[in-house]
C-alpha cells in the first residue's frame, strides 16, 4: 500500500480505523460466502479487529439504527414520489411496507459489514504515526478462544 492512499471515510470503506489503509474484511464482496470473515489483525498496521471477547455483539444496535434510518428514508421517499394516505381505500402504504422489507433484506449484507466497520471505528482511533507507534494489544481477550473462533 502506498503512503498517500489514506481513506478519509475509512469506516465507510471497511478500512482499519487506526491506519485507514488496511481492509478489515477478508473479502471485498458483500454478497459472497464468507462476507463477514474478518482479518484477526489489520494487514497493514496490525491493529486487532476483535478488541474484546464478544466485541461485535454491539453491532446489533448499529444495524438496528441503520435499518430504522433506511426505513424512514424509504418512507419519506415513497410519500414524496408516490404518495400515500391513511385512507381505508389507499393501499399504497402496504406497497411501501412490502418494498421496504425487500430493500432491507437485500441490503442486509451491506448493513452488517458497515455496522461492524462503524462499531470498530468508534473504539479504535486514527493514529497518525501508526508506523512508528506500537499497536495497543487488547487486554480483555482470550487468545486461545480467539484462535479457535
Ligand atoms: Zn490498520
Image (cartoon, grey):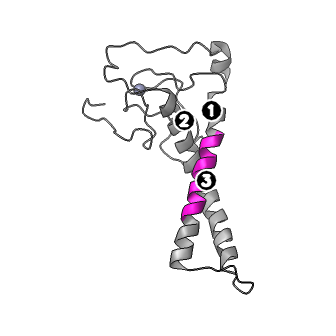
Q: Which residue is mark 2?
A: 119
Q: Residue at x 48, y 33 (%)?
A: 121
Q: Which mark is residue 19?
A: none
Alpha carbons under labels 1 and 2: distance apart = 8 Å
- Residue located farthest toward the front when viewing the structure as drawn: 86
Q: In the rendered structure, are the residues bearing label 1 and label 2 in contact, judged by CB atoms less than 8 Å apart?
A: yes
Tag 1 or tag 3, which sits nearer the N-term?
1
Q: Which mark is residue 67?
A: 3
Q: Secondary structure at mark 2?
A: helix
Q: Residues within 10 Å of mark 1 (few under 14, many from 20)?
A: some
Give the residues drawn in magenta, as a range: 60-73
Question: Does 68 sit above or below residue 62?
Answer: below
Residue 149 quadrant? top right
Residue 89 quadrant? bottom right
Q: Which residue is mark 1?
A: 56
Compared across the picture, whether 127 is left or right of 26 comes to: left
Q: Residue 61 location, x and y as percent? A: 64, 41
Question: Does 28 sit above or below residue 93?
Answer: above
Amino acid at each position: 500500500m502506498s503512503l498517500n492512499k489514506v481513506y478519509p471515510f475509512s469506516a465507510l470503506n471497511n478500512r482499519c480505523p487506526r491506519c485507514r489503509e488496511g481492509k478489515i474484511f477478508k473479502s471485498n464482496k458483500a454478497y459472497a460466502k464468507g462476507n463477514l470473515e474478518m482479518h484477526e489483525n489489520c494487514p497493514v498496521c496490525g491493529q486487532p479487529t476483535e478488541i474484546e471477547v464478544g466485541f461485535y455483539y454491539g453491532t446489533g444496535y448499529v444495524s438496528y439504527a441503520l435499518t430504522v434510518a433506511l426505513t424512514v428514508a424509504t418512507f419519506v421517499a415513497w410519500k414524496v414520489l408516490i404518495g400515500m394516505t391513511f385512507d381505508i381505500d389507499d393501499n399504497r402504504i402496504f406497497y411501501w411496507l412490502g418494498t421496504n422489507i425487500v430493500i432491507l433484506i437485500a441490503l442486509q449484507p451491506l448493513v452488517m459489514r458497515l455496522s461492524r466497520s462503524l462499531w470498530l471505528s468508534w473504539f479504535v482511533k486514527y493514529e497518525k504515526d501508526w508506523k512508528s507507534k506500537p499497536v495497543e494489544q487488547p487486554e480483555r481477550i482470550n487468545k486461545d478462544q480467539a484462535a479457535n473462533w
